[in-house]
Amino acid sequence: MAYPNHNIPIHIYTDASNYQMCAIIVQLKRPVVYWSKKLTNTQQNCHTMEKELLSIVMVLETFCSMYLDAKLFIYIDDKNLTFANLNCCRIFCWQLFVEEYGPTILYHPGKKNVTVNTFSQLPCWDELPFQWGRMLLLSSLTSCLKALTSAMTLP
């Protein structure tokens, strides 16, 4: 982990699954922030593209002071969000919010987005049976840490 530096470009890798969204903020190939949030029941009913964009919006809202005067690159694994002709009202409002930060949004295929995919696929504690919960969670965290250490070749 490192402290953010506003003079260096910031790279944000985001992902959303059916039950949670997550992001990793990186500078100079070093993680600055690991962020995740469980989706509410209403958010779980959203389309995949809306979940992906919501994860970007939530990260930008949460760490807004970190992005002041910094060049911002956001990597997503949903290619539809790289197009400008989206006309859903909710998506349009979220896109206007994201554009306030002036990021460059780049498509990063899910297979190359190993670290963020690992975080978004972790099982939630309340969804696991009690007797197996700790063992499954520990094994998931172990595999997550292995994926993080092997995939720290972020651009």
Image (cartoon, rainbow, N blue to C red):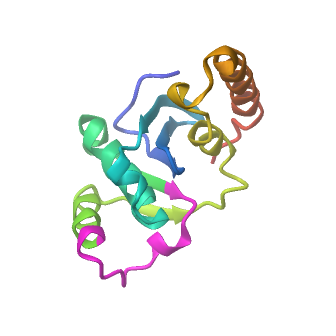
The segment highlighted magenta reads: 75-91
Q: Nearer the viewer, residue 118 or 30?
A: 118
Q: Position of residue 133 (x, y in %)?
A: 64, 20
Residue at (26, 72) in percent of width and height: 92
Q: Position of residue 60 (x, y in %)?
A: 31, 46
Q: Nearer the viewer, residue 57 or 136?
A: 136
- 110, above or below 5, in the image: below
Q: Position of residue 41 (x, y in %)?
A: 37, 47
Residue 140, picture quadrant:
top right
Q: Is residue 36 left or right of residue 111?
A: left
Residue 50, picture quadrant:
bottom left
Q: Is residue 111 left or right of residue 35?
A: right
- 43, above or below 37, in the image: below
Q: Is residue 82 left or right of residue 66?
A: right
Task: Mark yes or no: residue 56 visible.
Answer: no
Task: Mark yes or no: residue 93 visible.
Answer: yes
